[in-house]
Amino acid sequence: MTTHPSENDKIVDIVKVTKIYPPDVMALRDISLTARRGELIFLTGASGAGKTTLLKLLTCLERPTKGVIEIGGNDINTLTSKAVQKLRQRIGVAYQDFRLLPKQTVFQNIAMAMEVRFKSPKEIKQRVDELLEMLAITDKRNNPSGKLSRGEQQRVAIARAAANAPPLILADEPTGNLDDESTARVMSLFSQLNSQGSTIIIATHDASIYKNTHHRLLHLQHGQITEKDTV
Ligand SMILES: Nc1ncnc2c1ncn2[C@@H]1O[C@H](COP(=O)(O)OP(=O)(O)OP(=O)(O)O)[C@@H](O)[C@H]1O
Ligand SMILES: [Mg+2]
């Protein structure tokens, strides 16, 4: 007997999505992709292939030109701006350009994600300090994030995305500025979150993080997506 995964097993469902940036940049062409709860998916493709665009569509930073995107069974194109705000609070995003508040400290930048979810100050302190330790940036805890190196800022952005251990995490080129040791730390944090149930999509050029893993590997080329082997 074959078992079919139920519909609510899908956390992300992208159906025939096209994204054209005006006037005529075809960033994504008729893409379909389903992510099931608990998957870790690597998204690869040359610079300009559309990886960031795909992730931006999932948080409504960009809107599809055509097609439907469902997250947790809801068509995100029909959400009110308040509902979009709520959706964003439930997705942990580490942006390619970090988007930290430069004057706020490292601690404050990460804590913010938990404050909007009404976590207690005690829980916030515990979790933020744990993440700083895991990513080896404890010594920068009280420094303004704008004064950090790019690799340090990158780890702060990842810690912020991970803070609430959200059901969905999107990481855009998360190891782009990191040395081998920091890369290993970041990947071990993602593995931990994934084994605790978070679905994670990682856009990357870094083959070392997906080679010989058992996770899904998707490749974007000329605006289209194909499934590849990680071994
Ligand atoms: N706001 C925008 N306006 C117009 N064109 C855009 C915009 N954002 C991206 N593009 C174009 O869309 C295409 C896909 O860009 P995208 O940033 O998604 O690529 P990427 O795969 O993330 O690249 P990289 O690996 O360099 O980060 C590119 O041709 C890019 O120039
Ligand atoms: Mg990009």
Image (spheres, grey):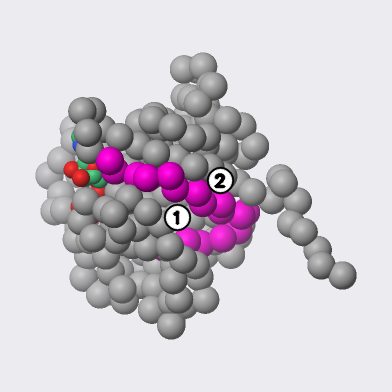
Which numbered dot is residue 79? none
- Disc 2 marks a residue whose amino acid type is Val
Relative to the observer, which residue lies in front, 159 or 71?
Answer: 71
Q: Position of residue 131 (x, y in %)?
A: 41, 55
At mark 2, the secondary structure is strand
Give the residue drawn at x 22%, y 33%. 24
Residue 97 placement (x, y as % from top left): 22, 44
Horizontal and vertical percent position of residue 152: 21, 55
Which residue lies at the image location 43% right of the left edge and 83% below the top edge?
Answer: 231
What type is the residue that disc 1 sits on? Ile
Q: Is residue 123 above or below residue 193?
A: above
What's the distance in space between the residues labelled 2 and 1, CA to CA? Answer: 10 Å
Tell me the tag on residue 12: 2
**Residue in the image at 50% along x and 70% along y:** 215
- The x, y position of residue 205, in whole percent, is 27, 65
First of labels 2, 1 by sequence position:
2
Which residue has dot 1 on it?
201
**Residue 27 painted magenta:** yes
Is residue 123 shown above or below 23? below
SS of the residue at dot 1?
strand
